[in-house]
Amino acid sequence: MSERKKVTLPALFAKLAEGTPITWLTCYDYPTAHLQEQAGIDMILVGDSLGMTMLGFDSTLPVTMEDMIRHTAAVRRGAPTAWLVGDMPYMSYQPSVESAIRNAGRFMAEAGCDAVKLEGGAEMADRVAGIARAGIPVIGHLGLTPQSVSALGGFRLQGKGAAQAKKIVDDAQALEEAGAFCILLELVPDRVCRLITERAKHCIIMSLGSGPDAHGQLLIYHDAFALYPKFKPRMAKVFADAGAVIRDGLTAYVDEVTARTFPQPDNWFGIKDEEYDELVRLLG
Ligand code: KIV
């Protein structure tokens, strides 16, 4: 049982007010959620990155609402007190304000979320406003927005030039004015992130590969623990090589079963002699 009090919106803003960075990681399953809860993580994002990290697709686009609800509810069971954010998958909010509100509501009602996140700037302000008006805390996502990876020309730094950086600053302002309580900046230059953080009035700015000057940091769990086999982005520090630990364990399992050194008597259960004798008698 977790002893921590539930993380709330006022608790997140209290951290911001006292200047303590907010911690945020992605998570997609029950056992990992349990570990993150034990570590005292403030926020958990069930990202549609699960399409890549958990399902092996090359992008996030094939992920459905059903995938998201299933994984998010599992994470909630493992992390009852973290501030849980459901990531709205591709085409769950782009078609209309109504689709955005309905699907945001599903994250809250069916998966036990505290908030939802969606990608895009001023063009998504009406979706953000609609969700916020429905009483659902909503997070914007600017910079590298993986659902638009094709239009952005790949997984690369956004806002390198002044004009593109100004658009990100303007988009952040539009999202805050529309009612976003938090904005994630993914892969934008550090000084652009700092500018947006300084200009935010009542909005938590989080950084993913956008430098140290936001109100907190997000990392993709699989990058931070060496669990994604295809690549490791430069922005991700590997905090522990869980991939190597698991691989070594798997090799040991294969070796021990092959050598008949596993299982040992501790790993199985016997039957009393009289029961076994009776069994043999019954079988004739
Ligand atoms: O899906 C996800 O994990 C995300 C991160 C890349 C921020 O949106």
Image (cartoon, rainbow, N blue to C red):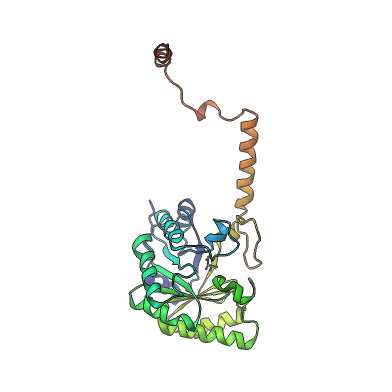
Question: In this rendering, is residue 17 above or below 106?
Answer: below
Q: Is residue 227 visible?
A: yes
Q: Could you say where residue 7 lies in the image, as x and y percent from the top left?
A: 39, 65
Residue toward you, 132 or 1: 132
Count of picture labels: 0
Question: In this rendering, is residue 166 above or below 103?
Answer: below
Question: In this rendering, is residue 4 above or below 213?
Answer: above
Residue toward you, 239 or 57: 57
Residue toward you, 52 or 201: 52
Given the current orientation, which residue lies at the most extreme front position? 95
Q: Is residue 5 visible?
A: no
Using residue 87 as the reference point, say whether residue 150 is left or right of it.
Answer: right
Residue sitting at x 41%, y 74%: 138
Quadrant of residue 164 in the image?
A: bottom right
Q: Could you say where residue 143 lies in the image, as x and y percent from the top left?
A: 57, 77
Q: Could you say where residue 16 lies in the image, as x and y percent from the top left?
A: 45, 75
Residue sitting at x 61%, y 42%: 249
Question: In this rendering, is residue 97 above or below 8?
Answer: below
Using residue 270 as the reference point, say whether residue 60 is left or right of it.
Answer: right
Task: Please state, as top left, top right, bottom left or bottom right, where the C terminus lies in the image.
Answer: top left
Using residue 97 as the reference point, say whether residue 186 is left or right of it.
Answer: right
Q: Could you say where residue 62 lies in the image, as x and y percent from the top left?
A: 53, 63
Quadrant of residue 159 in the image?
A: bottom right
